Amino acid sequence: MTPGARLQAAIELIEAISAARQAADDLVGGYFRRHRFAGVKDRAAISEHIYGVLRRRAAIDWWIARLGKGMAPTPRLRVFASALLVGEWNADQINRACDGDRFRPLPLMPSEHNVVVGLEGKTLDHPEMPDDVRFNYPIWLEPLLQRQFGERLRAEMAALNGSAPLDLRVNQIKSSRADARKALAEEGVEALPTPHAPTGLRVHGRIPLSSLETFKSGRVEVQDEGSQLAALLAQAKPGMRVVDFCAGAGGKTLALAAQMQNKGHLVACDISEARLTRSAQRLRRAGISNVERRPLTSERDKWVKRHAGAFDRVFVDAPCTGTGTWRRNPDAKWRLEPKDLEELQDLQARILDSAARLVKQGGRLIYATCSFLTEEDDQQVQSFLGTHPDFVLLPMPQVWREAFGYDCPDRSDTLHLTPAAHGTDGFFVAVLERVKPVAAEPDADAEPDEPAQDQTAA
């Protein structure tokens, strides 16, 4: 592909991302599957154009408005501005790439030309930019982020504007970390141990992961170190009965099953049967045989009531704003609206209330989000404890030492991981224990269980 064709592909994808609520990764991945003529270098260049815009959209739009005298930030201008401010292009290269030939952008309009010429030689930052523009976050979130981070806000937002490394979780059923690292090295991939998670390996740069035998054989899975730590803090042991209540495509289900060494019973629940179905291949590849996939109609599904007090561990990776994942999903920050936070808070509370019914006396409820926001994290936990006196919050330093044998990097009673402080995605984890027996619920609508989707075979 020519440089102009790469620009045009990026423009079309930015248009699609702006028009849809679908994740950028899914749209970009689908485009590359449909356009297999795009080589490795083409895909890398197109991705750099796209994510250059998504990571720094606020600053790019500020420059377009400044030089275009209030001109609207179109997908074309955003891609051109990113190439000039971030990608080391110059105005002449943009003009030559936009010749209107097949697969290349149409020639610049006079108003676009003025912006492009004005941007040449400029840097992304400008001293007149407000913080929300300089650090690229939605202005309506500033009070919430300021309350959470205080003086650390700029450092944390700057870290979120960078790209994330590729973290791999070693599947303890099939390999040790040392052996998996050696196997990757033999395939030409340098992987370093993650700083905190004993199951993790970190890779910098792009690698053809899906073609590696170490991956295809199920010895490693993609999982951010923060997510690995959240799963490990459940301390799911062989022989336990465990529920992954919001299992999705199965990332934490795999991690929990590996902890259990295929011994015991792990139920992966989700309201999306399609997501559960997609997890089947990953489970087979990992050699997991103790997982039952259970679609739910809602968080109040009758299956929950019928299994009240039956589980040692219930893991709730709750739906959230995903503010902690902006390094990987920068498009998500621009889709987020205040009403989304309000709706998610209500959903999180309902999920916690329902999932708690499954925990037996002495069992643990693990609540996790990939969010920084107190409204989704500590406030949810405190609200839950206020209405569930049969649960207590276990201090995180105690839980961390039980799980890992050394002092926790976060001294508060709940865990707050961040890119700037810990090098992980943003994660929150709270571990609650049921200290009183499960109260009996009315059984007026009791009926036999519907069959589970299946019991996943190794």
Image (cartoon, rainbow, N blue to C red):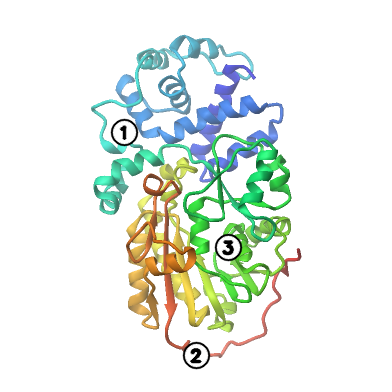
Is residue 69 something that shows in the picture? no
Which residue position holds label 1?
134
Q: Is residue 272 above or below residue 336?
A: below
Viewer-nearest residue: 423 or 404: 404
Name the image quarter holding the C terminus.
bottom right
Q: Is residue 132 above or below residue 49?
A: below
Q: Residue at x 39, y 61 (%)?
A: 407
Q: Residue at x 43, y 37 (%)?
A: 162
Which residue position holds label 3?
247
> Mark 3 packing: few (<14 Cα in 10 Å), some, or many (20+)?
many
Q: Earlier in the sequence, mark 2 or mark 1?
A: 1
Type of residue at label 2? Answer: Ala
> Mark 2 packing: few (<14 Cα in 10 Å), some, or many (20+)?
few
Q: Secondary structure at mark 3?
A: loop
The picture quadrant where one finds residue 346 is bottom left
385 to the left or right of 50: left
Q: Position of residue 420 (x, y in %)?
A: 37, 44
Q: Secondary structure at mark 2?
A: loop
Q: Is residue 39 above or below residue 398?
A: above
Q: Earlier in the sequence, mark 1 or mark 3?
A: 1
The picture quadrant where one finds residue 283 is bottom right
Which residue position holds label 2?
440
- How far separated are the C-alphas under marks 2 and 1? 54 Å
